[in-house]
């Protein structure tokens, strides 16, 4: 005969066992389901952020070429084209009788083109020097306009700086010879800016991607402006992408042809027909949305794949073993079940109290998993006791924190001012934070050496109001170009509508007085030649050197530089009134 104590104990243990098993099973199923959704959401976010990072680089190149093309179009004199009988040219080599020029007309046109090309060349070199990863830049003039003035081609293959090299003899190759002249004829055929590649660039003897901009003026095709980035530059960006421990990224064309893959050769779909490739290529040939996760099996392993389309038309694919994606969910679920059984076995006599203490953190943990599955990463779990649930909670918290940091890191990218091509205020804030860290870490030791120059472009509002915002933009770009020209070894930032800053360190810091004198000299030279209001460069400036005895942060230095700049502005205005 069983005692009441045994009956009650048995009833409590049975109830506890049923409760623990029921709760554990529900939690296990919920965590597995949420883990799968979380994994797919995480992979989508990773893919999107990787695409944004690569597109950011593509957009930088596009912006650089657009900037130069805009400048080239503005500088081209339509009247000179009319005088030189260069109107209505299409680049296809067919000249009408009215477009044929005598020797004097061609000579005059060639002389003008030489001057014009030199201006574009100076502008392009400055832009290219502020664009990362450019292997070559060029401006090729339509041979129908001039046989003598071809344009220019600069390359820095196997060199730290750009070197001018001979241009391609376009007439020596067929229009469909992409390796030699595709960069010229493809934008003509498309009639719009285009990404080309990757392809084996026989002119540079490397594999490249090219961004081309056809230039038109007064109804005539003038030529092609473009930049080449090496295949290796893009490959290195993709190699740096890390997805969990075993995941990786690769690049394919729209039909699935491999552009880069760590285990498959370039152009693999065209040359290799095997299960390894075919297992994922069908995804690109289906109607599947790139918002959905795709799965394929390789060497007996099931892998998850997400892809996104880049601005260049290529597709970036991220892939990882499904077992790794779901590993955290399985670990959480397994630990949950084990913890529940341990608690039931060891603390049966205190089942009611232990049940409450167990259910509370588990409910919190399950709720956190639900939030995580919805992409909400601002989760803070307070349960920190030294037991199995505490270990599980800390592990989950670490997972959330690491995931949040990783996604935040993917979201971060280089900031660039869209109009001038230099860095923007966000980049300046990042640079000053680095300086502040150096200042803080130097307490009691050698203080960092740096100076900040504050520039303010005078008369911008007057130019905008009287001449139009387009001329105001030209004025700002001219001012920015001058600053970049003088302080070529220092980072230049646009921190406001008409304000720029420069951070001087190392040699530029030590040579700051000479640089400032050169800036004033160059300003005077430009203004002596200026004719229109937007051609002048009127810039107030102020410079401040970090002084550890009075400056606690880079912001203090900036504040003093700003005060100096306003003093300079006041002196300038006072001089005008006099």
Image (cartoon, rainbow, N blue to C red):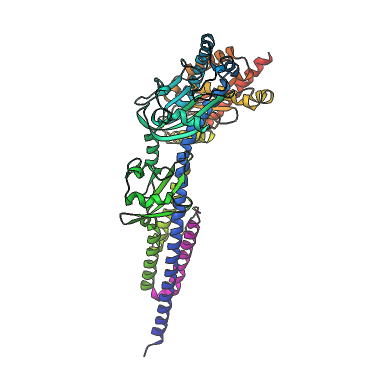
172 is within the stretch colored magenta: no
Which residue is located at x 50 percent, y 31 percent? Answer: 189
Which image quarter holds the N terminus? bottom left
Image quarter of residue 575: top right
Which residue is at the front of the view, 407 or 456? 407
Which residue lies at the image location 69% right of the left edge and 15% below the top edge?
A: 577
Q: Is residue 356 magenta?
A: yes
Residue at image point 43% right, 55% down? 39
Q: Residue furthest top?
A: 104
Q: Is residue 332 left or right of residue 368?
A: left
Residue 74 in the image: state x and y as whole percent: 58, 22
Count of numbered labels shown in the rendering: 0
**Image: 275 above or below 67:** below
Q: Is residue 421 visible?
A: no
**Residue 516 in picture, x, y percent from top left:** 51, 18
Q: Position of residue 335 (x, y in %)?
A: 37, 63
Up the image or down, 160 lies above or below 330; here it is above
Question: Where's the C terminus, which quadrant?
Answer: top right
**x and y, in percent, of residue 63 in the image:** 51, 31
Instruction: Report the side of 18 relative to 422 (left or right).
Output: left
User: What secondary structure prevails in the magenta region?
Assistant: helix
Comparing 74 with 487, the one in front is: 74
In the image, which residues are magenta? 347-376
Q: Residue furthest bottom?
A: 1
Residue reaching furthest to the front: 97
- Residue 483 visible to the viewer: yes
């Amino acid at each position: 005969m069983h005692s009441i104590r045994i009956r009650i104990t048995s009833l409590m243990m049975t109830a506890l066992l049923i409760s623990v098993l029921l709760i554990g099973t529900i939690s296990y199923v919920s965590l597995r389901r949420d883990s799968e959704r979380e994994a797919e959401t995480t992979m989508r976010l990773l893919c999107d952020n990787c695409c944004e990072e690569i597109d950011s680089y593509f957009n930088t190149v596009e912006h650089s070429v657009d900037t130069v093309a805009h400048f080239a179009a503005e500088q081209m004199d339509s009247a000179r084209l009319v005088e030189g009988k260069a109107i209505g040219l299409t680049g296809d080599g067919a000249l009408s009788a009215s477009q044929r020029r005598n020797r004097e007309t061609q000579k005059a046109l060639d002389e003008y083109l030489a001057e014009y090309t030199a201006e574009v060349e100076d502008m392009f070199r400055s832009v290219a020097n502020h664009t990362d990863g450019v292997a070559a830049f060029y401006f090729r003039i339509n041979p129908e306009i001039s046989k003598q003035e071809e344009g220019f081609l600069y390359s820095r293959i196997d060199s730290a700086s750009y070197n001018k090299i001979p241009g391609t003899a376009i007439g020596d190759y067929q229009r469909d010879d992409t390796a030699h002249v595709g960069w010229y004829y493809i934008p003509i055929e498309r009639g719009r800016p285009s990404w080309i590649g990757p392809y084996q660039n026989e002119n540079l003897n490397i594999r490249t991607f090219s961004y081309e901009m056809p230039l038109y003026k007064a109804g005539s095709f003038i030529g092609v402006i473009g930049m080449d980035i090496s295949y290796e530059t893009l490959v290195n960006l993709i190699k740096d992408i890390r997805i969990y421990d075993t995941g990786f990224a690769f690049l394919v064309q729209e039909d699935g042809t491999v552009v880069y893959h760590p285990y498959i050769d370039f152009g693999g779909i065209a040359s290799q027909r095997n299960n390894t490739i075919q297992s994922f290529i069908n995804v690109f040939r289906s109607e599947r949305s790139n918002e959905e996760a795709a799965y394929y099996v390789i060497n007996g392993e099931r892998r998850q794949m997400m892809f996104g389309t880049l601005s260049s038309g290529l597709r970036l694919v991220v892939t990882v073993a499904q077992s790794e994606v779901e590993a955290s969910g399985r670990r959480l679920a397994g630990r949950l079940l084990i913890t529940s059984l341990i608690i039931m076995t060891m603390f049966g006599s205190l089942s009611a109290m232990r049940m409450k203490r167990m259910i509370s953190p588990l409910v919190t943990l399950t709720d956190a998993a639900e939030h995580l599955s919805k992409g909400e990463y601002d989760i803070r779990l307070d349960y920190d006791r030294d037991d199995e649930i505490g270990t599980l909670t800390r592990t989950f918290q670490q997972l959330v924190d690491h995931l949040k940091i990783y996604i935040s890191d993917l979201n971060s990218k280089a900031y660039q001012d869209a109009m001038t091509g230099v860095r923007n205020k966000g980049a300046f804030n990042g640079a000053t934070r680095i300086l502040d860290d150096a200042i803080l870490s130097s307490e009691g030791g050698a203080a960092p050496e740096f100076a900040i120059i504050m520039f303010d472009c005078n008369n911008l509002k007057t130019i905008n109001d009287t001449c139009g915002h387009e001329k105001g933009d030209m004025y700002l770009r001219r001012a920015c170009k001058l600053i970049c020209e003088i302080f070529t070894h220092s980072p230049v930032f646009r921190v406001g509508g008409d304000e720029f800053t420069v951070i001087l360190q190392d040699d530029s810091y030590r040579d700051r007085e000479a640089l400032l004198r050169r800036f004033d000299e160059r300003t005077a030279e430009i203004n002596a030649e200026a004719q229109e209001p937007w051609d002048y460069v009127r810039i107030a400036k102020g410079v401040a050197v970090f002084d550890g005895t009075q400056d606690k942060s880079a912001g203090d230095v900036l504040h003093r530089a700003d005060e100096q700049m306003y003093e300079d502005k006041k002196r300038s205005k006072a001089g005008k009134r006099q």
